[in-house]
Amino acid sequence: MARARLFVFLIVLATGVGALGMWKARQRHAVEVVTVRRAALTATLSATGFVEATEVTITAKVTGRIAAILVDEGSTVRRGQPLIRLDTPDLAAHLQVARGGQAAAQAQERVAADIVNLTAAQVPTQVTQAHAALAAAQAQLEKLQRGARPEEIQEARAAAQQASAGLAAAQVQLARAQVALEQQKALSEAQLQQALAALAAARAREEMVLQGARPQEIAQAQARLRDAQARCDGAAREWERMKQLFAEGAIPKQQLDQAETALETAKAAEAAAREDLDLIRAGAREEEKRMARADVEAAEAQLREARAAAEQVRLRQHEVEAAQAQVAEAEAALQTAEAKVKLVEAGARPEDIEAARAQARQAMGALQEARAALKQIALRRRELTAAQAHTRQATARLQAAAADYKESLIVSPIDGVVARKLADVGELVTPMTPLFPGSELLKLVDTNRRWVVAEVDAEDLAKVFVGQNVTVTTEAHPYRAFKGRVREIGAMAEPKPGGRTRAKIVRVQIDLLDPAPELKPGLEVDVKAHATLDDNALLVPNDAIIINGGKSQVFVVVNDRVRLREVQLGKRNPTRTEIIKGLSEGDRVVVKGKEGLRDGMAVEVK
């Protein structure tokens, strides 16, 4: 009996187990699927950036003390507009000295040129004359040795007459040179005296400006003011009287207008007298003192020029000496010609022949001297070249001094706005100060053109392209959005400041399309943009992708069973991923219920 019950229990148990297995076999895993489709894959770019603009820092190019700052912070300036004026008395003095040096060098060059021209004009003539004199002396010697003929006697007399005419011409030339010398002396002396007088007057004016007004001048100005006030009061009383008479019909309107005009004239005279008194009491301004100092320096330069003009006197003296030499030479020629006539007429004597030989030797010596003087022309020309070089150097120094003096007025190199004023009136600045902190004078910003430099994460670089439209916002203006366009993408990736060790960014420059004065340079902004990564990509939701052992896989539902497939991924955005290989359009992939799935498992699609 017990065995029968045990057998029945085993049969029932086996039946239950079979039924449970059959129930489990019919039970399916529930999943949710999405059909793979082709569509455009888009992405949103978000980056942080900063507003930038052209900035220029103004520094001094010359040494000086700041006399005036002509702009304030926030002032709009134009290119070339004066910004800062430096007080540079040394540069003004250097400029005057350079002008005087140039004038002196030019005077020396003119003297050297005159000497060269004079030498070049006279010496070849002297050589020619020496040749002629030597030939004449030799011919005379030959004539004496062979005796004179009648025609030679006549020729000697003609030569004597010609020598006499040459002497007269040389004497006239000497007289002219002496007159020119005296005139040049008088002119140079007049210029010197005039320069001395101008210097004395300039120094007197400077002393007067520095001393200020005298008590008697102030008293005279006060007396003029009192007189003007009395005239004004009288004119006012007369106008009141005329107005009363006009109201009573006693006088015409023209007479009342004349009284009113006289009153206005008296008031203007009183105001002018009061202004004169105020100016006399105030004394000379700093610019008047500087102008007086500049007048003194200019007068000193004029004096130097007048003294340099004395070189012309020496030149005229050279001309006189040359003319005297020509007279002496003409006298000697005349004496020679007259002696020759006597010799020819008297016949040759031994002593005459010896004298002729001496004359020939003298003529040979004169020719040698003339040839030596001819060689001096090259030396004089070298002196002229040196004087010309000296003039060029003096001119260069003058140009440099003028350029330095011009730098005492600092002007704006750009159109922009004064962002910061970094110096004060009275500070001493030099060209070396940019090497030290606090040496900058002004900072200018060109606000006409601003742009944004966005720091784009390297992994987002595919979302950016040149010409892309972007939106710029900032916490400083939370209700404004500014339009922009990508102009340039940086050529290199840089470490992200303050970020992860291996994080990289690429700097992207963005042009602002609309005027945006609210976006101040240096302001932090947010940049957003939309980009289409692929116009026709095979897409699946990111939830469908399984990463297993470095492989990308998805579950594909085929005939109510799932198949595990390996896929190759492409571009992606926060919700969807492009499938390059492993799926086809129309495949259904599991997005929910992947837990516990195995390849080949039967599923129920919800």
Image (cartoon, rainbow, N blue to C red):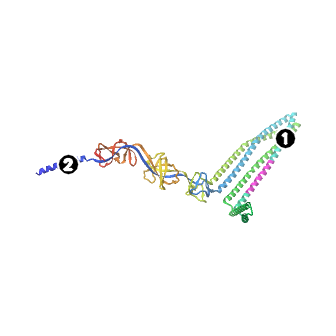
Q: Earlier in the sequence, mark 2 or mark 1?
A: 2
**Residue 219 seen by the camera:** no
The tag on residue 40 is: none
Q: Position of residue 311 (x, y in %)?
A: 75, 49
Extreme residue in the right direction: 346
Image spot of residue 1 (x, y percent):
10, 51
Residue plotted at (84% across, 35% down) = 143
- Identify the main secondary structure in magenta: helix
Compared across the picture, whether 1 is left or right of 420 comes to: left
Residue 151 visible to the viewer = yes
Give the crowd class for mark 1: few <14, some 14-19, many >=20 residues within 10 Å: some
Where is residue 591 shown, x and y percent of the image?
34, 47
Which residue position holds label 1?
A: 165
Q: Position of residue 497 (x, y in %)?
A: 46, 53
Residue 296's image quarter? bottom right
What segment carries the magenta color? 179-200
The residue depicted at 44 percent of the width and 46 percent of the height is: 531
- In this rendering, would 374 be left or right of 25? right
Mark 2: amino acid? Val
Report which residue position mark 2 lands on: 17
* Residue at image location 42% in from the left, 46% down from the top: 42
Looking at the rendered structure, the secondary structure element under dot 1 is helix
For mark 2, give the secondary structure: helix
Q: Is residue 263 above or below residue 502?
A: below
Query: Height in image: 299 above or below 112?
Result: below
Whether residue 228 appears in magenta in the rendering, the answer is no
The amino acid sitting under disc 1 is Ala
262 sits left or right of 598 in the view: right
Decide: marks 2, 1 in contact (CB < 8 A)?
no
